[in-house]
Amino acid sequence: MSFLRPNIAAMAGYVPGFQPPDGTSFIKLNSNENPYPPSPAVVRAILTELADDGASLRKYPSASSDRLRRIAGDLYGFDPSWIIMANGSDEVLNNLIRACAGEGEEIAYVHPSYSYYVTLAQVQGARVRTFGLTDDYRVADFPERYNGKIFFLTTPNAPFGFAFPTAYIEELAKRCSGLLVADEAYVDFADENALDLVRKHENVVVTRTLSKSYSLAGMRLGLAIGRPELIAALDKIRDHYNLDRLAQAACCAALSDQEYLRECVGKVRDIREWFSARLRELGYQVIPSSGNYVFAASPDRNGRRVYEGLYRRGILVRHFSDPLLSHGLRITIGTREEMAATVAALKEIG
Ligand SMILES: *Cc1c(COP(=O)(O)O)cnc(C)c1O
């Protein structure tokens, strides 16, 4: 079609993980969703929003999500002018590229990590530079001075699960003349985060999501924390009503129930350590994880074989055909029962 931009015509588009239809009975460990329901306060808040036969839905939601920015600001210790709310953190990743990287300009990311940055760059017509990982999980061949517009650093890394130490992220940020985006989608399951770097360095921005630790993948909620000048730029770009009323109500309630978050995250971390230990007993190589998933390789390093064995037993995990990843599997941490069933299935598969 001659009216399509050539980069759009040429690009493949992002392929999300397989989402079986609701009602099918897989043990679903392939999308790093949380096995527990969201805080009970979330459902109460949504039902309150729907009171009077949903009369409030007639009206547009808050365009600025300002109540959420205040709550998130209080939670993380920032003025609300440092916070932007997003329709999933994917939205804010997209708008960061739109704000900073023009057509033909360069962004970079680490491979393996979240490949959606590449899709977003292709839409924008930006170029993508890829950095690898060293054996000790540092960025390979990162220049003394990196002049690209954005460097995306997924930390904790997905799919491997390790987290970059904050001091190391700071060193990378100092070497970037553009923006360093710390994509902290899984950071609530980790021991450290990069928020201090946002305070110290004007070129560091942190993105977060409520999809994983807050069990709200279905509501599409994310946020970014950065300098007010950057946040103001992102505000110009986003859809003006980017968060609907139900999402805003859910987000307020979820962020306000930190005790529930701590409880869920604590359970997931405990099960993660239990499951990792069982995998090692089976001879699997397991990368110590700071997320709600583990990357593990069977003794024969044949990820496809184990994936298929699990699939036949009704357990869905993630296998990547990428040569750097095909030896292993990314397995989301589910409930204790789900992980026990997975261990039993792996024993059978051998
Ligand atoms: C899940 C995930 C996201 C997307 O989060 P949403 O808020 O669901 O859009 C972004 N980055 C990474 C690394 C993720 O794993």
Image (tube, rainbow, N blue to C red):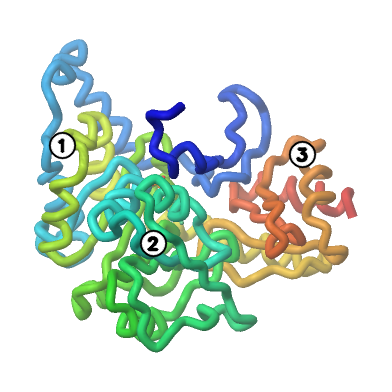
Where is residue 288? Give x, y as percent.
61, 72
Q: What residue type is labelled 2?
A: Asp
Front residue (pair 96, 145)? 145
Front residue (pair 257, 306)? 306
Question: Disc 1 marks which residue?
Answer: 240
Question: Disc 3 marks which residue?
Answer: 311
Tell me which residue sits at (45%, 64%) in the image: 154
Q: Nearer the viewer, mark 2 or mark 1?
A: 1
Q: Label 3 crowding class (10 Å Cα cut-off): few <14, some 14-19, many 20+?
A: some
Q: What residue type is labelled 1?
A: His
Q: Label 2 crowding class (10 Å Cα cut-off): few <14, some 14-19, many 20+?
A: many
What is the residue that sits farthest to the front in this orientation?
2
Q: Nearer the viewer, mark 2 or mark 3?
A: 2
Where is residue 245? Give x, y as percent.
20, 30
Where is residue 31? Give x, y as percent.
56, 45
Q: What residue type is labelled 3?
A: Tyr
